[in-house]
Image: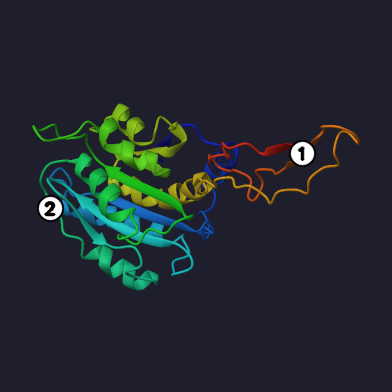
């Protein structure tokens, strides 16, 4: 059984129950743009790379895929990062699975930073097919740690643009060579978004658990507040001489939510009459 950090009570119940019966696959109803980032480095065997693909296919299948539902993209990385499946390229599970099975195994080094850069500049963008006002999710897998080279970025720097885009990032570490500190950087220090498996066989068995927790912890997109219409002017404060009339508006059209910004300008006007 994989070791997970910081379970919620709901998910802990699922883990207890799984010893006596298999988890039931449930569809994630949260409309999302989801990117799976696959480790394609040389430390992963051909067999384990297929297990990684199977994990991606299994977790992706729990999202309702379609133009008005969730979109799924895939990035693979080693010395370089590449987009293997674009947002909106496939709208059914069978076609998506066939595309994942065709992802090439690069078998070089572990440039996690390259995958983060590519996701921020080419996938989570309007040109990349990302949609406004839709939850953004990344699930990144690795069996090791970042390869440091002369042109590499530290992961805290590389992940910042994605954090600024309000992307919910989940890290999946496999094996003994992973660096927990690096994974925590990727997930913004949120332990509940970090999963560990001892090996790739265990990873495949735990796909539905990861899917359930991922769906549960997706952050809705931020909603910025906006003003309502101005109310009518009030009755003048004085019936004779100079008085004041006021009118107001409220920041509830809509109200700010999920980390969205409130309106900064004044919501009241006074007039001397």
* Direction from residue 239 to residue 197 in the image, left or right: left
Taking depth in this image into account, of 11 and 70 the one nearest to the observer is 70
Give the class, few, some or many, for how many residues have Cα within 10 Å of label 2's Cα (few <14, many ≥20).
some
Measured in 3D between alpha carbons, the distance from the residue under mark 2 to the one under mark 1, in whole angstroms, is 68 Å
Q: Position of residue 240 (x, y in %)?
A: 90, 34
Secondary element under disc 2, as helix, strand or loop, is: loop
Q: Is residue 166 visible?
A: yes
Give the class, few, some or many, for how many residues have Cα within 10 Å of label 1's Cα (few <14, many ≥20).
some
From the image, which quarter does the C terminus lie in? top right
Taking depth in this image into account, of 73 and 3 the one nearest to the observer is 73
| Residue reaching furthest to the top | 181
The residue positioned 39% from the left and 33% from the top of the image is 188
Residue matched to label 1: 246
Q: Position of residue 70 (x, y in %)?
A: 45, 62
Q: Is residue 4 above or below residue 138?
A: above
From the image, which quarter does the N terminus lie in? top left
Q: Position of residue 206 (x, y in %)?
A: 41, 48
The residue positioned 29% from the left and 42% from the top of the image is 199
* Residue 92, quarter of the rendered image: bottom left
Residue 106's tag is 2
Q: Is residue 198 visible?
A: no
* Direction from residue 87 to residue 166 in the image, left or right: right
């Amino acid at each position: 059984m994989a070791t997970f950090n910081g379970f919620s009570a709901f998910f802990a119940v699922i883990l207890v129950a799984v010893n006596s019966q298999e988890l039931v696959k449930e569809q994630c109803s949260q409309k999302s743009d989801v990117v799976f980032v696959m480790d394609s480095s040389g430390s992963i065997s051909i067999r384990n790379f297929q297990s990684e693909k199977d994990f991606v296919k299994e977790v992706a299948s729990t999202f309702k895929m379609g133009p008005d539902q969730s979109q799924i993209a895939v990035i693979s990385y080693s010395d370089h990062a590449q987009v293997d499946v674009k947002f909106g390229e496939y709208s059914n599970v069978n076609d998506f699975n066939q595309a994942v099975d065709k992802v090439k195994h690069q078998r070089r080094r572990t440039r996690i930073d390259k995958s983060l850069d590519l996701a921020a500049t080419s996938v989570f963008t309007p040109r990349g097919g990302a949609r406004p006002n839709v939850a953004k999710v990344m699930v990144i897998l690795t069996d090791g740690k970042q390869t440091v080279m002369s042109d590499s970025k530290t992961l805290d720097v590389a992940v910042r643009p994605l954090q600024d885009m309000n992307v919910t990032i989940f890290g999946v570490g496999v094996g003994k060579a992973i660096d927990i500190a690096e994974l925590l950087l990727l997930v913004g220090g949120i332990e509940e978004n970090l999963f560990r498996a001892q090996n790739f066989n265990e990873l495949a068995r735990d796909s539905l658990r990861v899917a359930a927790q991922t769906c549960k912890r997706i952050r809705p997109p931020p909603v910025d507040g906006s003003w309502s219409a101005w109310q009518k002017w009030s009755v003048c404060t004085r019936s004779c001489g100079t008085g004041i009339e006021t009118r107001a508006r409220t920041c509830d059209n809509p109200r700010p939510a999920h980390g969205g910004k409130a309106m900064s300008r004044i919501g009241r006007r006074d007039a001397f009459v």
